[in-house]
Image (spheres, helix red, strand yellow):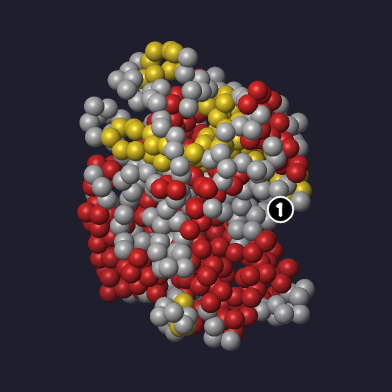
């Protein structure tokens, strides 16, 4: 399953990895609970709540080269949290989650723990939590705690669908661009095969796939909160992590101390509306890139902003039939090229690299764009992939309403192409169904407007030029949760703890002192 705008609906949504609406199987059902010093304990889960974790060296928890250095940081320790595979069967099979903790540096004024999710779905969270701990002084009073959500990273088992060689081959193949009946049939055969491999190659098989969604991650976080000794949850969620946060708030409003939700999708949007909004966001970011690029003498797209998009299309569209050899036995396909471009549009800091990659493409070279695509797909220098791609699909297939109506798929693809013409391959839209249409387990969640009573004020951060999670979505989420909105004026995806003093200071004051920024506050770079 490729994360590409040219693929079927879920794969196109995967460009942002951020379906962030509050999500559950309807309003949360009441549970029988008892209150203790570590908060409420749902009936039947006493063996999991308040469990003792054994903190140890983090070396065995590092699953990628990028994890190893942060997990060797001074004072950082890791542990395993045991949770039920299926919360409806707490006496049945169990799984474990990888946890990291960077203790508060001022123990005398320690508040508790800040549990962090970096987004996804499917993204492991250990190294991110450690990296963020050095910014804005929040770690002085809060332990920084990261976790690898079930099925990801160091958690066991992980969702596993494709081998490294199979994913390389899939990325090199632009078959999904073929909208002919035979092309659609081949794509759908591949999607059926992908779904079957996920069930066959994942530990606990379909039982794991049935219990991988946001519904289950929310329950895991509440167990983690208790095991850490916190009566109330203090939480930071980016991108898809805002979906986890809002779903937790709906399920356990009485257990929330504070939440920062940075980068969200409008909780009132359906999947197609979300797709089109994201396409619009990336098109806007690409337009901003053009405005920056044409001021440079070395701009790969020329000096005329009105012709730059056409120049871009002339560069990338030929890759659909004539991919470029990269020198390492691989080929840069149209899908890989546009994935690399999309990766660079997440932040203005990557625009220089994007211009370099496009200039290389003019010379029939592909190293930089392939490198950007590899970063997005999480392929390391050894040719090994994380399991993020597979976990992403597994979560989306149980979190979202499946689209099996070909007319709806075709309409979504057409609207996406219209909203983001710079990513249009020039061919007709395809009505091929994606892997979720053939998924072996049913959905466990339904998107809906969050309805939360008794929730403390939360802080929602939304960036005006966020290409992945458009600004208006943050406005809507803040309204739905009755929270305070902080606006950041920039072109990038998410903002908190990323070196923007105005944003960092406001978020830090809220997390440590529960002091919200004034109404209508706006920050800029």
The percent coordinates of residue 288 (x first, y second) are: 69, 64
Relative depth, front residue between 105 and 82: 105
Quadrant assignment, res 33: top left
The percent coordinates of residue 487 (x first, y second) are: 70, 42
**Relative vertical location of residue 247 with respect to residue 271 in this rendering, above or below:** above
Quadrant assignment, res 420: bottom right
**Relative vertical location of residue 362 with respect to residue 427 in this rendering, above or below:** below
Image point 37% across, 44% down: which residue?
155
Image point 39% across, 13% down: which residue?
34
Which residue reaches farthest bottom? 363
- The reply to whether residue 412 is in sight is no
The percent coordinates of residue 432 (x first, y second) are: 34, 64
Q: How many marks?
A: 1
Secondary structure at badge 1 equals loop
- Which quarter of the image is occupied by the N terminus? bottom left
Relative depth, front residue between 234 and 460: 234
- The reply to whether residue 55 is in sight is yes
Q: Residues within 10 Å of mark 1 (few under 14, many from 20)?
A: some
Image point 57% across, 54% down: which residue?
468
Q: Which residue is mark 1?
A: 490
Relative depth, front residue between 335 and 167: 167
**Relative vertical location of residue 319 with respect to residue 449 in this rendering, above or below:** below
The percent coordinates of residue 394 (x first, y second) are: 35, 49
| In this picture, residue 475 sits left or right of residue 53 | right
Image point 55% across, 59% down: which residue?
279
């Amino acid at each position: 399953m490729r994360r590409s705008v040219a693929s079927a609906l879920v794969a196109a949504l995967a460009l942002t990895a951020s379906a962030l609406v509050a999500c559950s199987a309807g309003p949360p059902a009441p549970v029988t609970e008892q209150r203790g010093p570590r908060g409420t304990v749902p009936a039947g889960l006493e063996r999991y709540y308040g469990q003792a974790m054994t903190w140890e060296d983090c070396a065995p928890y590092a699953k990628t080269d990028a994890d190893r250095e942060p997990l060797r940081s001074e004072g950082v320790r890791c542990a395993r949290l045991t949770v039920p595979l299926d919360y409806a069967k707490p006496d049945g099979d169990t799984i474990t989650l990888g946890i990291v903790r960077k203790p508060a540096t001022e123990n005398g004024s320690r508040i508790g723990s800040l549990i962090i999710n970096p987004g996804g779905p499917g993204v492991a969270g250990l190294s991110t939590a450690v990296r963020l701990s050095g910014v804005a002084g929040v770690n002085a009073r809060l332990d920084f705690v990261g976790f690898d959500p079930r099925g990801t990273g160091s958690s066991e088992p992980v969702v596993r669908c494709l081998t490294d060689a199979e994913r390389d081959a899939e990325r090199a193949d632009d078959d999904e661009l073929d909208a002919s009946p035979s092309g659609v049939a081949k794509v759908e055969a591949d999607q059926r095969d992908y779904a079957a491999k996920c069930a066959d190659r994942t530990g606990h098989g379909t039982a794991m796939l049935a219990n991988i969604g946001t519904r289950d991650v929310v329950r895991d976080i509440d167990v983690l909160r208790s095991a850490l000794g916190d009566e109330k949850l203090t939480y930071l969620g980016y991108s898809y992590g805002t979906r986890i946060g809002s779903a937790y708030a709906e399920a356990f409003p009485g257990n929330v101390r504070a939440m920062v939700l940075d980068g969200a999708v409008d909780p009132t949007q359906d999947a197609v509306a979300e797709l089109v909004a994201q396409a619009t966001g990336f098109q806007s970011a690409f337009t901003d890139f053009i405005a920056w690029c044409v001021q440079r003498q070395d701009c790969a797209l020329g000096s005329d902003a009105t012709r730059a998009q056409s120049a871009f299309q002339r560069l990338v569209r030929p890759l659909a039939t004539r991919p470029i050899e990269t020198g390492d036995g691989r080929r840069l396909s149209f899908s890989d090229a546009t994935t690399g471009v999309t990766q660079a549009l997440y932040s203005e800091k990557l625009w220089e690299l994007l211009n370099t990659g496009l200039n290389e493409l003019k010379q029939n070279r592909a190293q930089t764009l392939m490198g950007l695509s590899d970063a997005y797909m999480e392929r390391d220098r050894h040719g090994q992939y994380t399991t993020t791609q597979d976990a992403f699909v597994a979560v989306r297939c149980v979190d979202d309403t499946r689209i099996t109506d070909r007319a709806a798929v075709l309409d979504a693809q057409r609207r996406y192409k219209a909203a983001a013409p710079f990513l249009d391959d020039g061919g007709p839209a395809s009505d091929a169904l994606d892997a979720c249409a053939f998924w072996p387990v049913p959905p466990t969640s339904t998107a809906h407007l969050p309805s939360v009573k008794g929730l403390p004020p939360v802080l929602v951060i939304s960036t005006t030029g966020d290409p992945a999670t458009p600004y208006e979505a943050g406005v809507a989420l803040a309204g739905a949760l009755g929270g305070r909105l902080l606006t950041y004026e920039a072109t990038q995806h998410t903002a908190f703890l990323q070196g923007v003093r105005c944003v960092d200071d406001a978020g830090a004051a809220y997390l440590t002192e529960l002091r919200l920024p004034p109404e209508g506050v706006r920050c800029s770079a």
